[in-house]
Image (cartoon, rainbow, N blue to C red):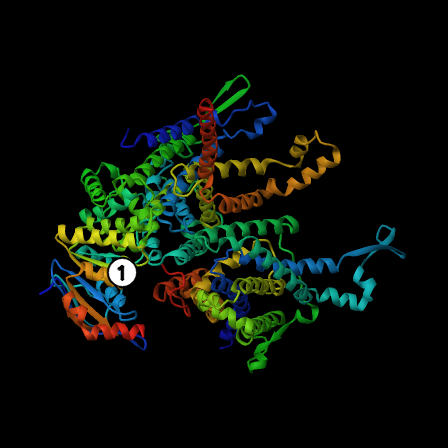
Amino acid sequence: MGILEVKDVGKRFGGLQALSDVNLSVKENTVHAIIGPNGAGKSTLLNCLVGKLIPDTGSVMFDGQSVLGRKPYEINQMGISRVFQTPEIFADLSVMENMMIPCFAKRDGSFRMHAIENMHNEKDIVEKAEAMLEDMNMADKKEMHAASMSRGDKRRLEIGMCLAQEPRLLLLDEPTAGMARADTNNTIDLLKQIADERDITIAIIEHDMHVVFSLANRITVLAQGTPLVEDDPENIRGNPKVREAYLGETA
Amino acid sequence: MDAIILQILNGLDKGSAYALIALGLTLIFGTLGVVNFAHGALFMIGAFCAVTLSKILSISFETIDPTQQDFLGNPLVVKTPYVHAWFGPEFGASLIDWAVPLSILFSIPIMIGIGFIMERGLIKHFYKREHADQILVTFGLAIVLQELVKYFFGANPIPTGAPDALTGAFDFGVFLGFDANTVIYPYWRLVYFFFSALVIGGVFAFLQFTTFGMVVRAGMADRETVGLLGINIDRRFTIMFGIAAAVAGLAGVMYAPINSPNYHMGMDFLVLSFVVVVVGGMGSLPGAVAAGFLLGVLESFASMNEVKSLLPGIDQIIIYLVAIIILLTRPRGLMGRKGVMEE
Amino acid sequence: MLGMNKKDTALMIVVAILALGAPILLNPFPTESAMAQFNAGYPDLMQRFAIFGIFAIGFNILFGLTGYLSFGHAAFLGVGSYSVVWMYKLLDYNVIWGLPLAIATAGIFALLIGFISLRRSGIYFSILTLAFAQMSFNLAYSVLTPITNGETGLQVYTEDPQVLLGANEANAPHLFGLVMNQSSKLSMGGWEFTFNNGYYFCAVILMLMFYLAIRIFRSPFGMMLRAIKSNNTRMAYTGLNPRPYALAAFVISGMYAGLAGGLMAAMDPLAGAERMQWTASGEVVLMTILGGTGTLIGPVLGAGFIKYFENIFSKINDNILHGWFSFLPDGLEDFVVFIIHPFIGKGWHLTLGILFMLVVIFLPGGLVEGGQRIKKLITSKKDDDSNTAKTEPAE
């Protein structure tokens, strides 16, 4: 039994069957990559997991509980955090504030009215946020305006914000898309470190095979909205079906 | 039955005005993505085009007629409009009489010009800014335009008559087989309605059957792709802004005889027209027209005594109430497209 | 101090000095001098500064922090005024009954309107609030006449119950006997200063409300509101529900507006529906933007600025202009007066509209940003000077 169980999920947009019979089981404390050519339904599947879309059929269970019909913030509070393709951070706020918000969300839940006390007097939150910035190697950027950071820093901040919530499952949507090689390698190292050091499960959607084979210890190949194979990285590499799916795209 | 027909008719002229203003608003929004709070001011300027032309036409020179005397026994001063002297008294008089319809010709170039200046001079710089900024800057512009008109024309409404031939009323009831004098409808309002239908039809035909319109429609649906095809969409959109301004102006010109123009008529119509646009669906042209007539007619039904005695005050709030209900149940309005102004 | 950092404490002290010293600070010119027309130390004008300051501070908590642009806040202003006048009519002229009621009713109205309007965002939210405010305005004028007294406006009549009215009680709004429209005057040389009870009452409340705003801005709640404005998607994917946060901000700002409306009625025991018209909502938007959206001091500055220039510009007429420009040759003098004429007196709104456009176009951060730019200009010049001073010896 995995931490995330996707059973028979189907989703149709008008005439297009975006997903059909998707079965997927993500085991606890693994890095599970979902790969596939463009238009294979990777993003649709991800959106079904976080509550942005509701599948037409099937079920999505997280830790034994259904996520279907719940709002994104409720699913997040269950322990699923999401990193976006283009970093979604609070661009108008300082880096420190960016980091404090998930700490508050973890401690106080989805809404709490504490409008009078000064936020910097919340010692536990401040300490936690500072420690997390330290982990992300951005303690020196604490007072910076988040919008003025480099793309690589924004990505790291976003990952740090997700980790500050101590999620059990971290979803990453093409985390290195549009990055220079050096930034990509830094991100791979960071994710490796996270996977090794923390008690966390990672599911990653990725296009870049270098990233996938550096990180994943389980891979699902998605083609035309349905899983083709699910196997260990070594076996995926030589699988003719996978080659066909990818070559078919490039040919 | 006759009462209901009367209410529908009464709602049509206001509905026409709403539809015309809302059409321009939604056109500007759909093409340029700008929320234009100064659109009501364009309607008002249109109405004052009519006022100006009728004033210009009646500019007179004075002559002293020695054959006649006024009540003090002095020789009578006779005012003769220049147009009488130039075109002969008969043609001159009918020119003055038909000042409002004539203003249509006079106002189109003016309104298109104002539209161009507004778009190139101000709105252009706000494409990339937030909607709140667009609202605020056009709101400021609306205040400025309104105060300028107030400065030049005064704060009081200026009665501007329809041509004599069209001032009477039409007994619509007899036409439909009811008793005489049950459904009386002023000719001018009928003219207004048909005029609006003509303008609306014109705009739709223009967008439907010309290449220019086709590009504009494609641009409304997917601006980026059209831009990628190497078509200069911005210039066409500027022209559309001019056309939207002209539509609002024409609505104002012809409205002058129905309600004497005053400087704040633009603001009064603006709020309601915005509600109309939202009810119709932001960026939907047919939606704007349908919602304009729908709300105009609903408003006129709500002001029937029978309805008012049942639901006191309903005539005051019906439009807002409908807008709230529609916004909550159909967030995209009656005919809105997906993804417009949704965060 | 009082849970504020140094910078905020300094700001609070500045506001307190300005508020308490206003009757002196705003009357810098001797009564007999030609410049006396620029004085602003009159009770009713100062009251307006304070009341609209409160209104704008509250509006800024919603618009400045969350970015939700409400065009319907005037409705809460009107509700506050009606509440206070009703308490005059039923109980007595002591404002202590009316003001809490004004805040409470405005809060309830805001809760209802906000709950519905906040189901939509962006322009749709603006239109919904506008629709609700116009509905309230139209109803106040028509069917609700038994409550609002329609076009005449609500006021106190001698046959009203006023059950708590004592034998010696003042026949005007007061706070436990401190009558609002009473003033004491102080003459010093050519100057005359008016210390008005009503003004000081408003000023003290303004200070309290400003302090409360500082605390809200610096609280976790305030940070969440800024997070809504910055990125709603990240907010939801961080496990936070934006709607109750925005609703709380809406209700708080509605209560500020209700208090401001109540204070209007506390200064002048009248309440009219025109206070609820959407142009009044537009005015508070204007004040907030002009001063500096999202800043603490901005809305207070904006409110003061607009109310001051409204007063000054409306008073200036052609004769005064001719007086100013009499040093010019006759033809030029007439020409200058002719050019300025549309902008003064009744033309104040034209000036306001132009000013508003200029601010939105060139200075989106308002007066506060303008001040910061000037400060930067000065300090950077100083830096340049010191740099050249340092490099010179090296050469």
Q: Quadrant of residue A132?
A: top left
Q: Secondary structure at mark 1?
A: loop
Residue A87 percent across, percent down from the top left: 30, 54
In the orientation shown, which residue stands out farthest toward the bottom? Answer: B177
Q: Nearer the viewer, residue C160 or A51?
A: A51
Residue drawn at x 53%, y 69% is B10
Measuring from the top left, give residue C189's x and y in whole percent.
54, 16
Residue B256 visible? The answer is: yes
Give the residue pinned by disc 1: A174
Which amino acid lies under the numbered mark 1 shown in the image of this protein? Glu
- Name the residue at the front extreme: C395
**Image quarter in which the N terminus of chain C is found:** top left
List the single residue furthest toward the left: A1
Tally of numbered discs = 1
Can you name the residue that lies furthest to the right here? B67
Residue at 52% of width from left, 22% of height from top? C192
Tell which of C162 and C185 is nearer to you.
C185
- In this orientation, which residue lies closer to the viewer: A182 or A140? A182
Would residue B9 be visible to someone looking at this image? no
Q: Residue at x 30, y 59 (%)?
A: A177
Q: Residue B71 vs residue B329: left or right? A: right
Q: Position of residue C255 (x, y in %)?
A: 34, 44
Q: Is residue C139 above or below residue C220?
A: below
Q: Chain of mark 1?
A: A
* The quadrant where residue B251 appears: bottom right
Q: Position of residue B305 (x, y in %)?
A: 47, 66
State left or right for residue A28 relative to residue B281.
left
Q: Nearer the viewer, residue C38 or B161?
A: C38
Q: Is residue C162 left or right of residue B140?
A: left
